[in-house]
Amino acid sequence: MIESTNSTRRGFLKAGGLAGVAIGFPTIIPASVLGADAPSKKINILQIGCGRIGRDMDMPGILRQDAARLVAVCDLDSLRVADAKTMVEDHYKKNNISLTAATYGDYREALQHPDIDAVSISTPDHWHAEPVIAAALLGKDIYVQKPLTMTIKEGRAVSDVVRKQNRMFQIGSQQRSGAQFRIACEMVRSGRIGKLHTVRIGLPSDPSGGSTQEIPVPPNFNYEMWLGSTPLAPYTADRTHAQGPDLKSRYGSRPGWLRIEDYCLGMITGWGSHHVDIAHWGMNTEHTGPISIEGNAEFPKTGLWNVHGPYHIEMKYANDVTVIIDHKFPNGIRFEGSDGWIFVTRGAERITASDPIPKGGASKSLQASKPEILTTPLGAGDVRLHESPKGDHHLDWITSIQTRKPAVTSAEVAHRSTSACMIGWISMKLGRKLTWDPQKEEFIGDDTANSMRSRAQRVPYGIDNMKK
């Protein structure tokens, strides 16, 4: 459907050694093949990563879009590929659409098919940057789960490539499409609480533990590629994702990789990238970052899981706003100004069954120190922010692809919210105050901190080893 840069695609495939490989692709035959339902008018989407988030959130989010067709699925676990194929085909069958979903075990092979218009990437955090860049270079529009990347260097590369290739992009910060978060940010930016001075962010924390007992790699799982650019490590039941005889045992719990720093930095980026994104939206600092950071945290000393436990971070921005992140705060974002406050959260909403709920149970999703802060309608001079159609984050992305107008998030906005979380993580790891230059994206006078903006990458994986 969408034209891509053929010269870029050919160069990438030739360099990657994939040119000339024949791939079968599904025939898409809707019940009606005329008018708006014609197959040529649908957006063909490839799903990369068919685990818990892909299955519970991103695949359903795409499947409900009439303008799109989920035509191919890809995962390094062949059981998950088979589950995803069945899920897709059953959905379309119920809607009187005949579709045979293509299946892949390597996203690089799947991406080369010219009929793929866009990709949805729901892989572990350490596998975000490479497929995003590969898709952008091949002219595909992109939806990717948060956090954007594992390192600041990767984030800058992703943002630059997506912008240069003019791809329509959406990060999985679905709070942006929630009405309460948009309203909160509109009210803050319209001055309803006076001069903003403090933002308090409450996030969950992860437990320690995890078995270090090495076991054989399941025959259905390409574990070596799953490790990607990270160091080789023994396979254990708690390192990657669950294996089991049924769907519940394979997808029902949070996977162990979320608690290992080689693959995820912990809740500071896991939930932090959600809430810092909203903080940036309300502060009007979406294209910059803090200027100073001071953090501390407890890190496990035993077991497999080594992401941070309890933590406290304070970040100062150039606009004189202080952002404080602490595991003891209620899960959400509290904007505090000279004339009042606004608190916004998901309330009792959970995106997946294993998401944490607020301490004390359900809470109101939008509150203020005075009712009129929220009830007084916006005036002609007030700030109005991007409103996702029907409050649907995936529909917002699909609409962006159709109109070629930006979605509610961009790669640069995603990079800035994620990098702010990473800066906090670096400060927690070092246990000292750091000074940050958001223009140059480097720490001032601290070589050790600067060295933590990137990581060594195991060949042949990682963005440094990609053939472009």
Image (cartoon, rainbow, N blue to C red):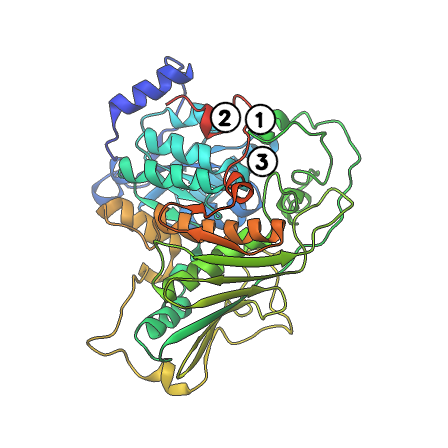
| Residue occupied by mark 3 | 80
**CB of mark 1 within 8 Å of CB of mark 2?**
yes
Check the picture and name the quadrant holding the C terminus: top left
Label 3: how many Cα within 10 Å (few below 14, some 14–19, many 20+): many
Mark 3 residue type? Arg
Mark 2 residue type? Asp
Alpha-carbon span between mark 3 and mark 2 = 13 Å
Mark 3: secondary structure: helix
Residue 77 in sight from this viewpoint? no
Residue 53 in sight from this viewpoint? yes
Mark 2: secondary structure: loop
Q: What mark, if any, has residue 384 been given in the picture? A: none
Relative to 350, is 233 on the left or the right? right
Residue at 39% over, 30% down? 134
Comes first in the chain, label 1 or label 2: 2
| Residue occupied by mark 1 | 225
Where is residue 310? Give x, y as percent. 67, 60
| Residue occupied by mark 2 | 106
Where is residue 355? Give x, y as percent. 60, 58
